[in-house]
Amino acid sequence: KRVKKLCFPPITEPQDSLIHSWEFDAAIDFENKTLDNALNLSNADISSLEKEVVEKYQEVHDLLNSGNTKAFRALFESSLIREAKTEYYTEEETQSYIAEQLVWESKARGAMLPLANYTLKVHLNNKTVELISSDGNSALISMDKEGYTRTHGFYLYKDKSTGKLMVF
């Protein structure tokens, strides 16, 4: 069994609350060093940075609109693997998660709305950025035939060694 039964010590008198602690070793790699290789953007030229970010978002927009899941996977795979790792997924669960994301993103084929009305958001760590709409969601939006909208959010960071924007 993957989950062990949780057992508390016997209670002999009624209690308002119960506190019990224990230690365990999850034996799972959970460190994320991706942003160790990210440039600090606190002194970046915001106008120039925004132009670069918009270009990258337009690239992803076009990729989603074309339905090219192979190219999408190539661009986002390390990000999806990092996400799965933070959820402690097994290798099998990670591959399933990536496949599910590809199905979700493939629904944007031919349904992407134009990239418009966005604001560049530099996150407090000064290493990640994104384009957000006026309601705070991703500026990348698709709308299916039934009028259902989907947002396609992601963060970018600038790689220290190349200076290129990368998907976080």
Image: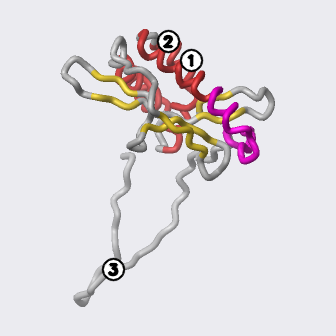
Residue type at the position of mark 2: Lys
Q: Which mark is residue 74?
A: 1
* Quarter in which the C terminus is drawn: top right
Dot 3 and dot 2 residues touching (CB under 8 Å): no
Instruction: Give me the residue at 78% from left, 34% from top.
Output: 160
Local crowd at mark 1 within 10 Å, few (<14), some, or many (≥20)? few
The tag on residue 14 is none
Sequence order check, earlier mark of 3 and 1: 3
Observer-nearest of 58 and 28: 58
Q: Which kind of residue does numbered mark 1 sit on? A: Ala
Report which residue position mark 3 lands on.
18
The residue carrying pointer 2 sits among few (fewer than 14), some (14 to 19) or many (20 or more) residues within 10 Å by Cα, namely few
Query: In the rendered view, would you say 80 is above or below 114?
Result: below
Kindly indicate the quadrant of the structure image that contains residue 33: top right
Q: Position of residue 75 (x, y in %)?
A: 57, 21
- Dot label at residue 70: 2
User: Of helix, strand and loop, which one carries label 3?
Assistant: loop
Spot occupied by residue 4 in the image (x, y as percentages of width and height): 37, 55
Which residue is painted at 67% across and 47% down in the image?
A: 126
Determine the residue positioned at 39% across, 46% down: 2
Q: Secondary structure at mark 1?
A: helix
Pointer 3 local density, CA inside 10 Å: few below 14, some 14–19, many at least 20:
few
Q: Considering only order in the chain, which callout, 2 or 3, is on the residue closer to the N terminus?
A: 3
First to last magenta residue range: 34-52
Q: Position of residue 76 (x, y in %)?
A: 54, 25
Left or right: 119 as drawn, with respect to 44: left
In the picture provided, is 82 more to the left or to the right than 93? Answer: right
Distance from Cα at disc 3 to Cα at disc 1 = 49 Å
Q: Which sits in the foreground, 15 or 62?
A: 62
The extreme bottom residue here reads 13
Q: CA distance from mark 3 to mark 2?
A: 51 Å
